[in-house]
């Protein structure tokens, strides 16, 4: 097999039609990044470093001292740290399980190896590097390009829809529970109304697109109409394929969801919910009072912060997520427990950004060892036959 633009090729040099319809950019399928992509990676890496420096040298000192933040972190008991770590690992497991029903024959263990390797790379290298890593690992175990791309597109679309819809749902839950919180609701209604509007639009679009292919094409047409003026400004060709791509993504997502809705809801929705619970638990562990920020309010604010980081400007949203989550919680809580909020967000990011670097490195080593044994066994079987 030959490789061209990241797609498997037949011996006559033509790409298989199924793989060409994969729905992911060539770089995500293992192709080399172009000059523009390399430039964006460099800029993203620079921005990541600049944001981290700004976070610790300028932002944190403005809202609390580093000593107080460190004191809040070290105040956690060992048992609390263990429970937070278990929660973070449970999230990793749910993310891996989401791919199992979408790729027949894929075991949970292999999906976990591929997913963790992907997470580690995407937290360091910008662009679709993580997707490319996951593709390479799963491809080595015989997963087809189209099957992988379909699963990836399906999971991504469902995840993004949930990110847009969840803040308003969490806000409604907080209101239905009687708006529990002693203080610290300075701007919660303004943020909640905006989140509710976003949720309403998202649900209307998701339901409408699921029922209507013409609506999906219309959304694609509107999207390309919005980006084409900017593309002309930078001397790039007009986009004309978004209506067809939107129709294809709709069809692929419906295909993936059909028969797997329960499992996908449990894995993707459960992973999202656990992330919110983990962040609120980290804030509590670092000193934020539960009476000031009950779980329902904390989940709502997590949803708003997660929405603010949906576009991965930096690898793993490093620097951006820390600032976004801190700003959202401080906007509503006001001046209460500033250092505790910063400390809780940093602990959460250690569990969701730094931890995958460790588990991903271990997963990559395990994959290399497994492949070495599998290749050796295959060679021995061919010799014996």
Image (cartoon, rainbow, N blue to C red):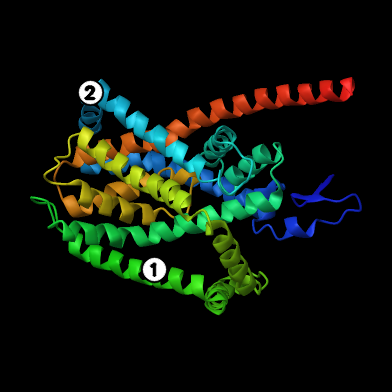
Query: Can I make out residue 201 in this image?
Result: yes
* The C terminus - image quarter: top right
Task: Name the side, left or right, on which 292 lies relative to 238.
Answer: left
**Residue 322 % position (x, y):** 35, 44
Name the residue carrying label 2. 77
Query: Can I make out residue 64 in this image?
Result: no
Residue extending farthest left: 182
Q: Say which residue appears at 47% left-offset and 47% top-offset.
A: 47
Is 335 in front, or is 65?
335
Mark number, residue 142: none
**Residue 143 % position (x, y):** 69, 43
Q: Say which residue appears at 54% left-offset and 49% top-offset.
A: 43
N-term mark: 1 or 2:
2
Residues at badges 1 and 2 in contact (C-beta under 8 Å)?
Answer: no
* The N terminus - image quarter: top right
**Residue 19 % position (x, y):** 74, 55
Query: In the rendered view, would you say 9 is above or below 109?
Result: below
Secondary structure beneath label 1: helix
Query: In the rendered view, would you say 224 is above or below 317?
Result: below
Query: In the rendered view, would you say 121 is above or below 3?
Result: above
**Residue 8 % position (x, y):** 78, 49
Query: In the rendered view, would you say 246 is above or below 43?
Result: below
Q: Residues within 10 Å of mark 1 (few under 14, many from 20)?
A: some
Is 334 in front, or is 163?
163
Q: Gap between marks 1 and 2, in whole Å? A: 41 Å
Q: Nearer the viewer, mark 1 or mark 2?
A: 1
Name the residue carrying label 1. 203
- Determine which quarter of the picture holds residue 286: top left
Secondary structure beneath label 2: loop
């Amino acid at each position: 097999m030959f490789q061209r633009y990241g797609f498997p090729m037949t011996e006559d040099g033509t790409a298989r039609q199924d793989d060409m319809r994969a729905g992911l950019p060539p770089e995500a399928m293992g192709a080399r990044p172009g000059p523009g992509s390399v430039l964006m990676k460099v800029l993203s890496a620079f921005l990541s470093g600049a944001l981290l420096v700004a976070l610790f040298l300028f932002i944190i000192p403005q809202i609390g001292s580093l000593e107080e933040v460190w004191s809040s972190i070290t105040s956690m008991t060992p048992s609390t740290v263990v429970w937070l770590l278990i929660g973070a690992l449970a999230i990793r497991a749910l993310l891996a399980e989401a791919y199992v029903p979408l790729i027949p024959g894929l075991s949970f263990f292999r999906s976990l190896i591929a997913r963790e390797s992907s997470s580690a790379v995407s937290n360091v290298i910008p662009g679709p590097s993580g997707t490319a890593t996951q593709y390479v690992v799963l491809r080595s175990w015989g997963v087809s390009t189209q099957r992988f791309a379909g699963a990836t597109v399906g999971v991504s679309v469902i995840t993004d829809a949930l990110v847009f819809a969840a803040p308003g749902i969490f806000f409604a839950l907080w209101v239905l529970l009687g708006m529990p919180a002693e203080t610290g609701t300075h701007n919660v209604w303004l943020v909640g109304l905006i989140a509710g509007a976003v949720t309403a639009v998202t649900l209307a679009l998701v339901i409408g697109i699921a029922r209507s292919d013409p609506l999906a094409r219309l959304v694609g047409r509107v999207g390309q109409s919005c980006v084409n003026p900017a593309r002309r400004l930078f001397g790039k060709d007009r986009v004309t394929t978004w209506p067809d791509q939107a129709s294809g993504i709709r069809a692929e997502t419906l295909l993936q969801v059909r028969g797997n809705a329960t499992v996908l809801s449990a894995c993707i929705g459960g992973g999202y919910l656990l992330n919110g619970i983990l962040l609120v638990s980290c804030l509590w562990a670092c000193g934020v009072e539960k009476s000031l920020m009950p779980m329902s309010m904390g989940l709502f604010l997590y949803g708003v912060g997660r929405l603010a980081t949906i576009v991965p400007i930096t690898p793993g949203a490093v620097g951006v997520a820390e600032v976004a989550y801190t700003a959202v919680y401080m906007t509503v809580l006001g001046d209460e427990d500033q250092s505790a909020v910063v400390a809780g967000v940093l602990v959460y990011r250690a569990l969701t950004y730094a931890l995958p670097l460790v588990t991903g490195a271990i997963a990559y080593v395990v994959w290399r060892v497994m492949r070495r044994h599998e290749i050796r066994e295959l060679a021995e079987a061919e010799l014996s036959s």
